[in-house]
């Protein structure tokens, strides 16, 4: 359900902003210093883009797995795709969490506090078991699961799956799978930067380098060779 917890100082960001890459995961973001009790929800990004945060601040973030944000928030996920939304207007419990995070000593303590609050405010009845099953399967296979296999269950048509995923993830199953393949390519490149694009495409399950080129252009606006030449894991926050 929780993809990761993270913390960063905005003074360490590039001047042009943090590079947010598509991963279909929305975030809750809390400002630790200076104290500011207006937590934000940051919607998932459908395309790579730069995002600016206030200077001279320390932020704590909670990244949710795709398809589960509605368990914790009343914000319709489709309404804040790539946008910031104040959580205090829809989910007042996040204000108390903000206070607790600011008073905590250290990152480990903050993650424990966040987990406690999330368990208290998790609405399991609002979950979509089908979407969570699909998203988990796609993430575990890094997008290499055949989409027609997802609709093999009785009463689970392609059209029904697309409707559910668009509602809870803002992407069709195919688009989500392509996003996961893109993420795998980024991680693989970071670990093996000397591989050729053909080798990278093969390792990440693309049909060929032309297929990988098409996905990269759609998600980043440029070819893999251009994007990866400028890519630095130290300055990129996958989002």
Image (cartoon, rainbow, N blue to C red):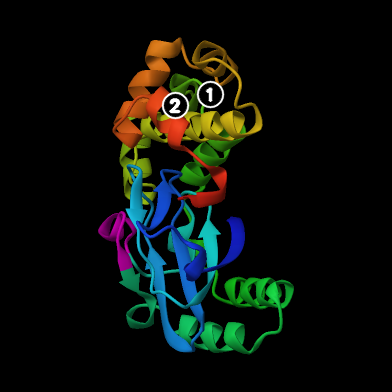
Q: Is residue 98 above or below residue 187?
A: below
Front in this rendered view, residue 186 or 226: 226
Label 2 SS: loop
Task: Answer with the quarter of the image where residue 157 lies.
Answer: top left
Please report contact status of discs 1 and 2: CB closer than 8 Å, yes or no. Answer: no
Front in this rendered view, residue 199 or 11: 11
Point 38% across, 50% down: residue: 168
Q: Is residue 91 above or below residue 135?
A: below
Horizontally, residue 12 falls left or right of residue 44, namely: right
Bounds of the magenta segment: 76-84
Q: Is residue 81 magenta?
A: yes
Point 29% across, 33% down: residue: 221
Residue 32 percent coordinates (x, y): 53, 81
Q: Is residue 156 visible?
A: no
Label 1 SS: loop
Front in this rendered view, residue 235 or 212: 235
Residue 90 percent coordinates (x, y): 35, 78
Nearer-N-terminus badge (1/2): 1
Residue 233 percent coordinates (x, y): 55, 44
Q: Is residue 222 magenta?
A: no
Q: Is residue 65 visible?
A: yes
Label 2: which residue? 151
**Quarter of the figure with the N terminus:** bottom right
- Foreground label between 1 and 2: 1
């Amino acid at each position: 359900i929780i993809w990761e917890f993270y913390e960063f100082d905005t003074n360490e960001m590039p001047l042009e902003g943090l590079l947010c890459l598509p991963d279909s995961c929305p975030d809750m973001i809390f400002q630790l210093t200076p104290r500011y009790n207006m937590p934000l929800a940051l919607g998932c990004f459908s395309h790579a883009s730069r995002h600016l945060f206030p200077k001279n601040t320390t932020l704590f973030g909670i990244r949710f797995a795709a398809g589960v944000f509605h368990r914790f928030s009343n914000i319709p996920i489709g309404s804040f795709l790539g946008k910031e939304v104040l959580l205090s207007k829809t989910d007042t419990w996040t204000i108390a969490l903000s206070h607790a995070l600011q008073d905590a000593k250290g990152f480990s303590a903050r993650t424990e506090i966040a987990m406690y609050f999330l368990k208290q405010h998790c609405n399991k009845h609002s979950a979509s078991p089908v979407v969570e099953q699909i998203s988990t399967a796609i993430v575990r296979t890094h997008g290499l699961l055949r989409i027609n296999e997802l609709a093999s269950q009785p009463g689970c048509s392609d059209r029904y799956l697309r409707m559910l995923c668009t509602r809870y993830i803002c992407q069709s199953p195919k688009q989500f799978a392509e996003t996961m393949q893109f993420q795998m390519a980024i991680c693989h490149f970071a670990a093996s930067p000397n591989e050729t694009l053909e080798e990278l495409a093969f390792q990440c399950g693309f049909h060929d380098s032309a297929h990988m080129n098409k996905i990269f252009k759609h998600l980043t606006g440029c070819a893999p060779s251009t994007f990866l030449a400028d890519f630095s894991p130290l300055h990129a926050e996958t989002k």
